[in-house]
Image: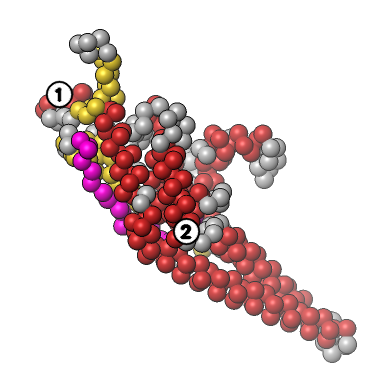
Amino acid sequence: MGIKSITTYLNERNIRTRDGGRWGIASVHQILTRTTYIGQHRFNTRDHKTRTAKPKAEHAVMDVPPIITEVEFEAVKAALKARSPKWMPPRAVSGPTLLTGICFCASCGGAMTLRTGKGSAGGMYRYYTCSTKARQGERGCRGLTVPMDKLDRAVVDHLEWRLLDPARLTTMMDQLLERREEWNERRRGHIAELRKRAAEAEAKLKRLYEAIENGVVDVADPSLKDRIAELTAVRDQAQADAERATSSVERLGPAITSDSLRRFALAARRKLRNEDGTYRRDHLRALAQRVEVVDPSEIRILGTKTELLRTLVAAAGVESAAGGVRSFIPKWRTRRDSNS
């Protein structure tokens, strides 16, 4: 869902802001980009007179309890950047062409855009061609032009029979899934510690109340109120932190097994091959984030393992597909002969 879709979703269900108002695009964007939710609350971000933004070096940052992981935050940030019209024209985001917005010329880095025209026999031709050459001529780039149907078929074929081969998929994801499980175990240990801390504070409160009832503790003692408030705060904070940590583990979704990888691969192949294109374009972009045309006979298909894992978890039926590992996982890269 994009920002507009999220805004519409909230307003249609009468989910209000904390002030009781309706949601707008700006308020949703502010929440999605606020570092407070990963534990970094920022002050002194604007000049109090001119209201202009200050450099990040002048910001004051206070540590607060995080409620989402940095992985989730960075994934949302990357999605916002990828959808932004500043980086990609609106037609590239919503256009019907399979590779629009993710296909680039390897020589100059320029986007490969659709070119159409009538052939000598009266038929229509459709090509991906280097936009730099189209704008600047051969001085900008010698340019590449590839028949659209051939390039589309080459990319889909490669994803279908190489990336979505169950055995290859299992081998490629082993390390990432292992890291994901390690992170999961650490979070479960942290949750156990938080619950233990809350239980200990609750037990101390109970003993303190019993001492008051039995007359062992003087109710007039000035430190008694502060001690009760301190223990209550420790208990409530530990319980709240445990709930948030539990939610982050649940958002990771179910375990990814060899069997679920096989089922995902088979389902993804079917979706890539939908004749009406309903799912094909979106599903392809979940598997590959960039296609580079090196020459008329060679292309490179690039993507990240974290994005692939997020797709796997989402395919397993989890609404919020969090990666659960840090973003240092290297990119997977494949090469494909576009003449095949």
| Quadrant for the C terminus in the image | top left
Along the line of sight, the residue nearer the viewer: 47 or 7: 7
Which colour style is shown? secondary structure
Is 218 drawn above or below residue 329 in the view shown? below
36 lies left or right of 326: right
Question: With respect to residue 313, does 17 lie above or below?
Answer: above
The rendered magenta stretch, by its main secondary structure, is classed as loop
Residue 204 visible from this viewpoint = yes
User: Which residue position holds label 2?
Assistant: 259
Q: In the structure shown, which secondary structural element does the residue marked by tag 1 occupy?
A: helix
Instruction: Count neighbours of disc 1 (C-alpha within 10 A) and say few if under 14, some if 14 to 19, many if 20 or more.
Output: few
Q: Is residue 204 left or right of residue 2?
A: right
Reply above or below: 138 against 267: above
**Is residue 325 one of those drawn in magenta?**
yes
**Extreme right residue here?**
214
Span of residues in magenta = 322-340
Residue occupied by mark 1: 137
Tell me which residue sits at (58%, 64%) in the image.
Answer: 245
> Circle 2: is it few (<14), some (14-19), or many (20+) Cα within 10 Å?
few
The residue that appears at 35% across and 61% down in the rendered structure is 171
Residue 66 makes an appearance in the image: no
